[in-house]
Image (cartoon, grey):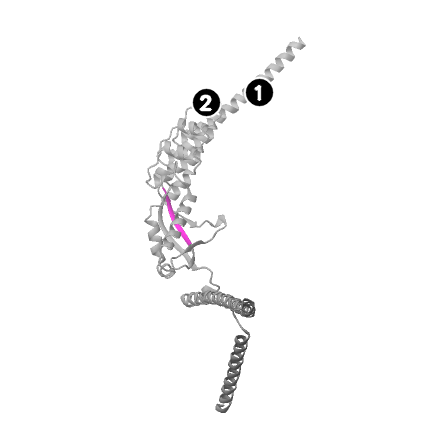
Amino acid sequence: MGRTMGVVTILMFLLAIGVLIVIGIFFYFIKVWVRAWMSGARVKLLNLLGMKLRGVPPTLIVDGRIRAVKAGLDVDSDPLEAHYLAGGDVIQVVNALIAADKADIELSFPRACAINLAGRDVYDAVRTSVNPKVIDCPDPSKGTTMLDAVAKDGIRLLVKARVTVRTNLDRLVGGAREDTIIARVGQGIVSAIGSSPTYKDVLENPDNISRKVLQSGLDAQTSFEIVSIDIADVSVAGVSGVKEVANVGALLESERAEADKKIRQAEAEGRRAMGVAVEQEMRARVQEMQAKVIEAQAQVPLAVAEAFRGGRLGVMDYYRMQNIMADTSMRESIAGSEEKHGIKEQG
């Protein structure tokens, strides 16, 4: 009898616990159901129970449906539940639909879910579509604050631009992101400056550069529509204290003149070195010719000796030749002394 009473007590205890759990679950679903019913976004109790069994938080789905209904949108709980099971952000999609509806932007629930599942912030995309945002070009987070471009006259310019973009919801899935816009705009600005005849044209009319880049259709196949491209800053590179110089052109011309002078000096030094080399070469040639003359003179005694041995030259002929040479040497010495004497008298 005592054992039977113990078993009954345990069963009653377990039954009481079960009843309390059922009552707790019932009141949980009743609370969610009442909140949905009072908000005009009715959800069946069986649907709430099914959500719980499928691992979907009923409160999240009900909150999303309440927001949509209060904003005048009729979004059933089944699509919201399916989007949650697919790994999407239900509240973000609902907020995006509400924002698009208030801004009179056409955005369907399937497209919003597709954008969200693609990893894009659909709510931010709708806000950017209503309120365009500004992108710095180049991106300072990449470690570069200015674009470096060179005009046709060889002057380097540092340029910073700001690009105003609006999200294109139709191309948000599969469209390129901000990095592509920044890269294209940077390339367009560098190309436009490179086609300018002189850097002065860029400094005088920077809007021509931005207008030319804007007309290039750089937003094709991207998630954005470029509203405007504005040149925020442009300066001449490689000039110290350029912001304090009143006449940048004169400073650049003076630096260019200094560079030209150094180039001309280097060319003159090259020509001088070449002249020195030619002079040394000519001296070597003169010495070579003198050596040949001495060599030729050394052949005269040998020829005379050979003529004696061969009988072609007699003793009298040799003495006569010696007399002629001595007479010639005397005349040359007399003529040289007279020339020196005449020069001294004139002095």
Outermost residue on the bottom side: it is: 345
Q: In the image, 347: left or right of 108?
A: right
Residue 299 percent location from the top left of the image: 54, 68
Tell us which disc is closer to us: 1 or 2. 2
Q: Secondary structure at mark 1?
A: helix
Q: Can residue 66 be found in the magenta stretch?
A: no
C-alpha separation, residue under disc 1 versus residue under disc 2: 23 Å
Judge by depth and name the residue closer to the eye, 71 or 110. 110
User: Vertical placement of 308 versus 341: above or below?
Assistant: above
Judging by the rendered image, the residue that carries numbered circle 2 is 50
Q: Amino acid at mark 1?
A: Ile
Q: In the image, 237: left or right of 204?
A: right
Image quadrant where one finds the N terminus: top right
Judge by depth and name the residue closer to the eye, 2 or 153. 153
Asked whether residue 131 appears in the rendered view, the answer is no
- In the image, the segment drawn in magenta is 160-167
Main secondary-structure element of the magenta-colored stretch: strand
Q: Secondary structure at mark 2?
A: helix
Q: Which mark is residue 17?
A: 1
* Residue beneath the point at 54% across and 75% down: 318
Q: Amino acid at mark 2?
A: Gly
Ranked by sequence position, the earlier of labels 1 and 2 is 1
Residue 220 percent location from the top left of the image: 35, 42
